[in-house]
Image: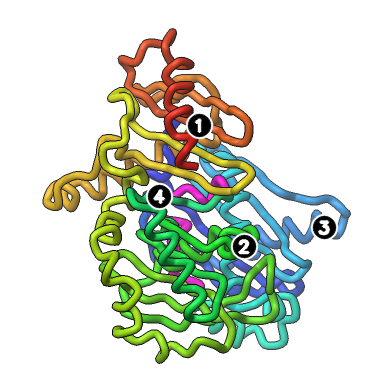
Amino acid sequence: MGEEGTEGTVHLLCLAASSGVPLFCRSSRGGTPARQQLPFSVIGSLNGVHMFGQNLEVQLSSARTKDTTVVWKSFHDSITLIVLSSEEDTLELRLERLLQMVFGAMVLLVGLEELTNIRNVERLKKELRTSYRLIDSFLRDSELIGDLTQCVDCVVPPEGSLLQEALSGFAEAVGTAFVSLVVSGRVVAATESWWRLGTPEAVLLPWLVGSLPPQAARDYPVYLPHGSPTVPHRLLTLTLLPGLELCLLCGPRPPLSQLDPQFLEHWWQPLLDPLRACLPLGPRALPAGFPLHTDILGLLLLHLELKRCLFTVEPSGAKEPGQQEEKAENATHQAQVPRACYLVSGTEEPGTGRRLVALQLGPRRLLLLLSAQSPIHGLRGLASHTLHALTPLL
């Protein structure tokens, strides 16, 4: 199977379903955002053939040419999303999940009412600009996988119980039940109420935080696509360390001014070392020193009931700072292999000189990407041993 996102172009179109007026077009080439736009005649034709089918009570959901896959999806008879991908071996499932995430992002930042009751198209176009950064992050090659698995990307901190205790106390002090720690778009720890957030907001909120430029503090209005699609909440984010953010989901209170540096220091200064230990967890997901077989190049562990996942292509540990910068692009590219393999998960060789083994036990599903020299007869035993070792973590 070809590696996802290494070449080809993806075009994402959003149109008002009733009028066919384009609301936005976003594109990427080789996993990087691009300015390339489709001609209006092509957009009109793609929408026209979809509407023609609807008028005949035929639902056109996808089509494939020699080098391009097209997927259509309508939401609430108001918004039509179309995605075209010329990336090698693109699967329709991946594009369908992409459209679901994109509409979820639109609801998250604009609200369902604005999307289902379009009064002014030009005003809606302007409001949707706030979602571009998040939507573009779905089109990039990503080290996250929650967009495909619909599970929250998590990491396992070395001193999780200390952080969890502090997080619960902090949540009680500020008067909100929804608090989490996020590093590089992955959840480090969260309160029980945060974990009970529905899909897709549980995946979208940390992904949003990871997609935004660094900022000491934010007060961001958000809607919850599942829990509160028409009434906005406030997403407060506070940077504890560069790359590590404290996130609160709340109503009118507390005011951002209440969360001043002195207040934060009172709660988090005693935990400075455990917090610092979370920073390298972004790419690795697992604590330093966690024993994994040297043949494991990447792993994905899903807990299907909790809707959480661990995903890494750096199981051997984080690089040194200089090395990490030098190989950042390669690590992102490498992440696309297990992302692509997830879509066809099974015991097979994915055509990349690596081996793939999948194992499910109860609510846990493990996907391992292994080096080519790993013996075939030992794959199941290696997967079983790894799943047993990972079970206490998730």
Name the residue rendered at 44%, 58% in the picture. Answer: 189
- Provide the residue span drawn in magenta: 131-149
Q: Amino acid at mark 1?
A: Leu
Residue 337 rendering spot, x and y as whole percentages: 40, 36
Q: Which residue is mark 2?
A: 197
Q: Amino acid at mark 3?
A: Gln
Say which label, 1 or 3, has the lower sequence index: 3
Q: Which residue is mark 1?
A: 366
In this view, 364 is above or below 78: above
Say which label, 1 or 4, has the lower sequence index: 4
Residue at the left extreme?
Answer: 322
Disc 1/disc 3 C-alpha distance (Å): 40 Å
Q: Which residue is mark 3?
A: 54
Disc 1/disc 2 C-alpha distance (Å): 24 Å
Magenta-span inclusion, residue 123:
no
Q: Secondary structure at mark 4?
A: loop
